[in-house]
Image: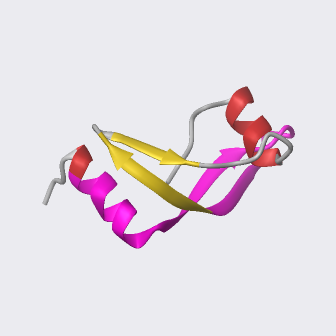
Amino acid sequence: MIMESQECLSMLREMRDCAFATMDRDGLPAVRIIDVMLVEEGRLYFCTARGKDFYEELLANPAVAV
């Protein structure tokens, strides 16, 4: 079964929490649980703080695994 992107996003919104994997500054994987805030028009919205490693990792490399 192949799900459309909106279906996947809606499922994530219903679950609310999901794991995001990024790469840290040493190139190692870093995984954390985030709260899905909103799904709208094919986009997933979540929050993080500017002082967090997660924020810096997203700026350095926006590719993530969810």
In-front residue for pair 58/23: 58
**Picture coordinates of residue 8, whole percent (x, y):** 29, 55
In-front residue for pair 7/47: 47
Task: Please tell me whether residue 35 belongs to the stretch shown in magenta.
Answer: no
Q: Which quadrant is the N terminus positioned in?
A: bottom left
Left or right: where 4 falls relative to 29:
left
**Picture coordinates of residue 62, whole percent (x, y):** 61, 32
The magenta region covers 7-33
**Label total for image:** 0
Furthest residue in direction bottom, as rendered: 15
Residue at the spot 68% in from the left edge and 61% down from the top edge:
32
**Picture coordinates of residue 3, whole percent (x, y):** 18, 53
Furthest residue in direction left, as rendered: 1
Left or right: where 15 falls relative to 22:
left
Task: Please tell me whether residue 29 belongs to the stretch shown in magenta.
Answer: yes
Residue at the spot 49% in from the left edge and 58% down from the top edge:
36
Residue at the spot 51% in from the left edge and 64% down from the top edge:
18
What colour scheme governs how the chains and residues are painted in the rendered image of this protein?
secondary structure
Residue 61 is drawn in which quadrant? top right
Residue at the spot 59% in from the left edge and 55% down from the top edge:
20
